[in-house]
Amino acid sequence: MTLREVAASQAKAEGDTPAQFEVIEHRHLWDGRVIGLEEDEVRLIEDAEPVLRQYTTHPGAVAVVALRGEAGNEEVLLERQYRHPVRANLWEIPAGLLDIEGEDYVCAAQRELAEEVDLQANQWDVLVDYFTSPGGSVESLRIFLARDLVELDQEFERLDEEALMVSSWVKLDDAVDMIFAGKLHNPSAVTGILATWNARARGWKNLRPADSPWMR
């Protein structure tokens, strides 16, 4: 049997698992304001030559689908933000970096919901976890579902691109239609909205507790 056939015979599609391969040499190439650039020579196959892999480091992030409304007629909160790398105004969901060392993930999501749209929520669940670009970055993102929303008395000051943000409540079904029509492009918005739509169809039974383990 070939190495690929051996690996295939041992693999079962039961979920992602951490893995470690031998790193022959590691080099730190560059540091930016948020991301860094790393380079590894890693041996994937025993006795074979190592391969070169470059990737960005990233602190990770959380995002929030804020949901309100009666059953079957729910609305999600979208916010429009300018994203310079793609030169576009994108409709997104509240999100932010995990850039406070030791901060609890739920607390980070609560902070972002308050700072970006002046809301808090009494019910929190995990919708989905994903790596944003696992072939080239370590960035991981968790999307929470926030329900039983309450408006805050105070408004947060917003700077830079956030000062230009506007928000809008959109029916969940309409948001799904926007995705399939190619009108929404932000990955956390697309993933979070589709996950919420699916969770509603399943009677919210596939949601995980807000403090669930996270492979990151």
Image: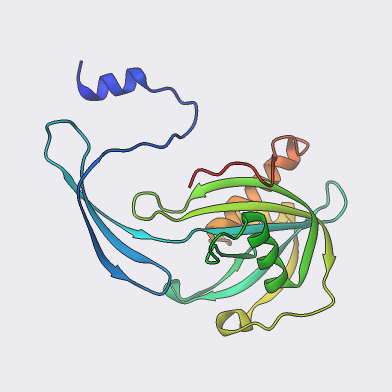
Image height check: is 158 above or below 50?
Answer: below
User: Residue 174, position in %: x, y?
Assistant: 71, 56
Residue at the extreme front of the image, as rendered: 102
x then y, percent, for residue 70: 88, 51
Numbered disc total: 0
Out of 167 and 11, give the one closest to the viewer.
Answer: 11
Furthest-right residue in view? 70
User: Which residue is painted at 67% across and 55% down in the image?
Assistant: 106
Q: Is residue 87 visible?
A: yes
The colour scheme applied to this rendered structure is rainbow
Quarter residue 183 falls in: bottom right
Residue 46 position, x and y percent, is 17, 30
Quarter of the figure that contains the N terminus? top left
Relative height, residue 47 to residue 71 (above, below): above
Q: Is residue 190 above or below residue 91?
A: above
Q: Residue at x 50, y 43 (%)?
A: 215
Q: Nearer the viewer, residue 8 or 156?
A: 156
Q: Specify whether 160 is left or right of 171.
A: left
Q: Is residue 149 above or below residue 53?
A: below
Pick the residue in front: 29 or 74: 29
Q: Is residue 180 visible?
A: no
Residue drawn where x is 46% and y is 35% of the image = 16
Is residue 146 rendered to the left or right of residue 89?
A: right
Image quadrant where residue 137 sits:
bottom left
Query: On the image, which quarter does residue 76 sit in?
Result: bottom right
